[in-house]
Image (spheres, rainbow, N blue to C red):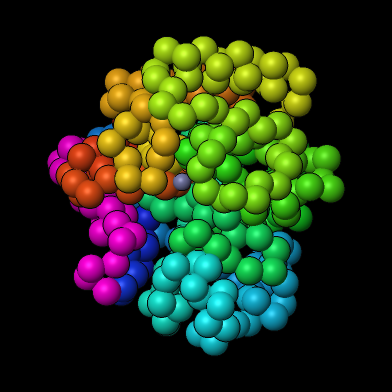
Amino acid sequence: MKLPIVHHPAYTADIPENHRFPMRKYAGVAQWLKETDPHGGLYEFHEPTPISRENLLRVHAKDYVDQVLCCQVPRAIAREIGFPMNESVSFRAQCATGGSLLTAMLALEHGIACNTAGGSHHARIAQGAGFCVFNDVAVAVRTVQTMRMASRVLIIDLDVHQGDGTADIFAHDASVFTLSIHSEKNYPVRKRASTLDVPLRDGMEDDEYLTILEETLKSVLATFKADLVFFNAGVDPHHEDRLGRLALSDDGLRKREDLVFRMVRNAGIPMAGVLGGGYSFDLGLLVSRHAILYQTAAKYL
Ligand SMILES: [Zn+2]
């Protein structure tokens, strides 16, 4: 079987060439997947439709949703998001959110599926923040729950930044377990309580990180019976990342992905992977780090 990959060309939005956000990584990941699978034996591409307003409203406030859809986001919120809130950025957010929904549905059908975008975990109910417009994973979770495709969902967020938006959205929802393993002193300054937060000290390296991850996953999987897992595989805990404060190596990231897929698949739970953060200057290296998610996922189909 081929690994379902959800991708849309609109994931790469038009922002100024010198913008600090590495927007070209999304197209880069799709290109990498196609180049490393020239005969199409490993990956099967699916193009998502933009998320509907109705599905966005399952998570986000009406005023904010309409501001984004009409490209009339107040300047203060746009500044907090960090993108020029133009038509292209708005459409990207709609496609990435539709993409995470399609990824969840494909995962429930085939066992594993991955989006080449997603993981906008700083977006909270009434606004976006930190390069996140809509909380794609939260919208996907609420939508598959409404469609009765899944009822209990575990979100494993290993992006180096705390998943404050996701924590906020599901704060009073016992059907969703939010796990965030992140750098304690990093953005966001004001963290929101996840179901389980594991804050890590600056400069943590592979071995210690992997031990903590394994112990944490073991106890979470034993206590919360999920019928879908979302995995935010941000690569910003890497030691070369501009916005991380941890010190994982490429090998550490590979072992991390392997551990997550092995433990979740051994528990028999479908898995939806999303790309998450990654901010190295070198686009080639950044893409190759994000690619570990898809390489690993393909092994556990
Ligand atoms: Zn991050």
Q: Which residue is drawn at 41% across and 31% down?
A: 246
Q: Nearer the viewer, residue 135 or 130?
A: 130
Q: Is residue 113 visible?
A: no
Q: In this view, does 47 lie above or below 256?
A: below
Quadrant in the picture for residue 146: bottom right
Q: Which residue is drawn at 63% across and 69% down?
A: 127
Q: Answer with left or right where residue 31 lies relative to residue 233.
A: left
**Residue 255 horizontal/vertical position (percent):** 38, 19
Q: Give the position of the N terminus as an image quadrant.
A: top left
Q: Give the position of the C terminus as an image quadrant.
A: top left
**Residue 92 horizontal/vertical position (percent):** 42, 68
Q: Which residue is drawn at 57% across and 83% down?
A: 74
**Residue 13 horizontal/vertical position (percent):** 34, 70
Q: Nearer the viewer, residue 164 or 152?
A: 164
Q: Residue at x 71, y 32 (%)?
A: 196
Quadrant in the picture for residue 56: bottom right
Q: How many labels does the image show?
A: 0
Residue 22 belongs to magenta span: yes
**Residue 273 horizontal/vertical position (percent):** 48, 40
Q: Is residue 176 visible?
A: yes
Residue 7 belongs to magenta span: no
Q: Which residues are drawn in magenta?
A: 16-38
